[in-house]
């Protein structure tokens, strides 16, 4: 057994689930146990489980057969240690309690798998005294310090298939099809699925859109005899002047989605029929793609090496074919948005895709 500075580690998953979490848990824990003899404590329900002391030792059997399974075997929550919600809705700071529980479990380090918000919460635990190593997971692909996050490839593949599948109804009915993708405040998912699926317009938060411009590009397609148009919209996309007092769409649920508004506006401006699809949590479900399994395994096993070296308080980011340990201070609070001159955008513009800003 190789030498290790870490003797006992905790592991938890926090924030929204995504495909590849189990592959990453397996990567870290199998390499940590198998190569370095590190004991692995699985903490359930994200930071909530750390605060409420819900955990159990993970052995080989727990780590077997999970590579292909979506979600997270450790379950997750959106609980933040510094904003723990009481039954009456009040929130209190449980950072010190989290540190106490970390100590009483005898942990040398806590491995935290999470998105942008989780990276910030992880840094707060470091400031409270915990040793932490994080891994970047999110379908939004918006974490700084890594080329890509696991979960994204699966989500963008699902999004692409949705664009593909919308083509037949769009063509058969001569319609505009508006597809809303997740992504929070970044456009990676809508951009990736839009370009890969051949959407005719792609609207992302990084490029505020003019609906007149989108309508003009669709009108032009109509004049050229194209029977349909497909618009991929990121959930965080906004018109250049903001939504304003959009009273017509006040109310609950789906009427607030940007895709619903875009669909109505385009019908009004083009005279063509529009239909809206909001893809939602389907994007986060199911088995991870090969690319996500490879990434999660690469980053997970790299984390085991950092545990052995005692190289703490970093995120394991992907860098080209390899990986890098990035100080958490450089990751927490930073969002990796789509650069407006990104190669995918430039390529899409050259083949006639509208971004609503022409
Ligand atoms: O961060 C992943 C994500 O799916 C975002 O794309 C989306 O905005 C958000 O989570 C939805 O969060 P929840 O699962 O809390 O509804």
Image (cartoon, helix red, strand yellow):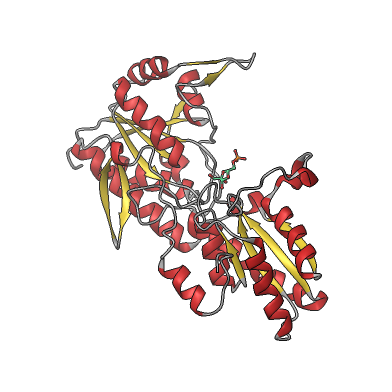
Rendering quarter of residue 108 = top left
Report whether 90 appears left or right of 290.
right
Q: Quadrant of the C terminus?
A: bottom right
**Foreground: 50 or 339?**
339
**Foreground: 159 or 205?**
205
Task: Name the residue located 41 percent from the left edge and 65 percent from the top edge.
Answer: 342
Report whether 162 appears left or right of 351.
right
The picture places residue 22, in percent across and down from the top left corner, at 48, 46
Report whether 216 appears left or right of 41.
right
Q: Quadrant of ligand 1?
A: top right
Q: Is residue 265 in view from this perspective?
A: yes
Task: Name the residue located 77 percent from the left edge and 39 percent from the top edge.
Answer: 252
Report whether 271 appears left or right of 118.
right
The picture places residue 334, in percent across and down from the top left corner, at 38, 42
Q: Quadrant of the N terminus?
A: top left
The picture places residue 74, in percent across and down from the top left corner, at 50, 36
The picture places residue 290, in percent across and down from the top left corner, at 46, 63
Task: Name the residue located 51 percent from the left edge and 74 percent from the top edge.
Answer: 349
**Foreground: 85 or 347?**
347
Q: Is residue 41 in view from this perspective?
A: no
Rendering quarter of residue 176 = bottom right
Figure label count: 0
**Foreground: 289 or 253?**
253
Task: Name the residue located 58 percent from the left edge and 70 percent from the top edge.
Answer: 354
């Amino acid at each position: 057994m190789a030498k290790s500075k870490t003797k006992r580690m905790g592991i938890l998953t926090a924030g929204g689930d995504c495909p590849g979490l189990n592959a990453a848990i397996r990567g870290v824990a199998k390499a940590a146990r198998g190569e370095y003899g590190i004991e692995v404590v699985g903490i359930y329900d994200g930071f909530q489980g750390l605060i409420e002391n819900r955990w159990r030792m993970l052995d080989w059997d727990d780590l077997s057969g999970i590579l292909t399974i979506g979600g997270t075997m450790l379950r997750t929550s959106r609980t933040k240690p510094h904003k723990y919600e009481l039954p009456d809705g009040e929130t209190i700071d449980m950072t010190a309690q989290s540190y106490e529980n970390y100590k009483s479990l005898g942990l040398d380090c806590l491995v935290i798998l999470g998105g942008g918000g989780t990276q910030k919460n992880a840094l707060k635990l470091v400031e409270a005294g915990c040793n932490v190593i994080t891994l970047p997971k999110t379908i939004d692909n918006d974490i700084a310090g890594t080329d890509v996050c696991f979960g994204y490839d699966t989500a963008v593949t699902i999004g692409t298939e949705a664009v593909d599948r919308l083509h037949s109804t769009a063509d058969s009915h001569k319609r505009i099809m508006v597809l809303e993708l997740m992504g929070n405040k970044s456009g990676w998912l809508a951009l990736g699925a839009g370009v890969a699926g051949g959407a005719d317009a792609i609207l992302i938060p990084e490029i505020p859109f003019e609906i007149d411009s989108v309508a003009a590009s669709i009108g032009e397609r109509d004049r050229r005899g194209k029977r349909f148009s497909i618009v991929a919209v990121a959930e965080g996309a906004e018109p250049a002047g903001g939504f304003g007092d959009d009273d017509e769409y006040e109310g609950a649920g789906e009427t607030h989605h940007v895709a619903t508004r875009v669909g109505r506006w385009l019908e009004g401006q083009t005279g063509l029929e529009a239909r809206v699809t909001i893809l939602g949590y389907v994007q986060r479900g199911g088995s991870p793609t090969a690319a996500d399994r490879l990434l999660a395994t690469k980053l997970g096993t790299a984390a085991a090496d950092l545990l052995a070296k005692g190289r703490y308080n970093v995120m394991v980011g992907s860098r080209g074919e390899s990986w890098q340990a990035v100080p958490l201070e450089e990751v927490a609070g930073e969002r990796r948005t789509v650069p407006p001159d990104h190669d995918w955008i430039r390529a899409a513009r050259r083949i006639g895709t509208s971004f609503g800003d022409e």
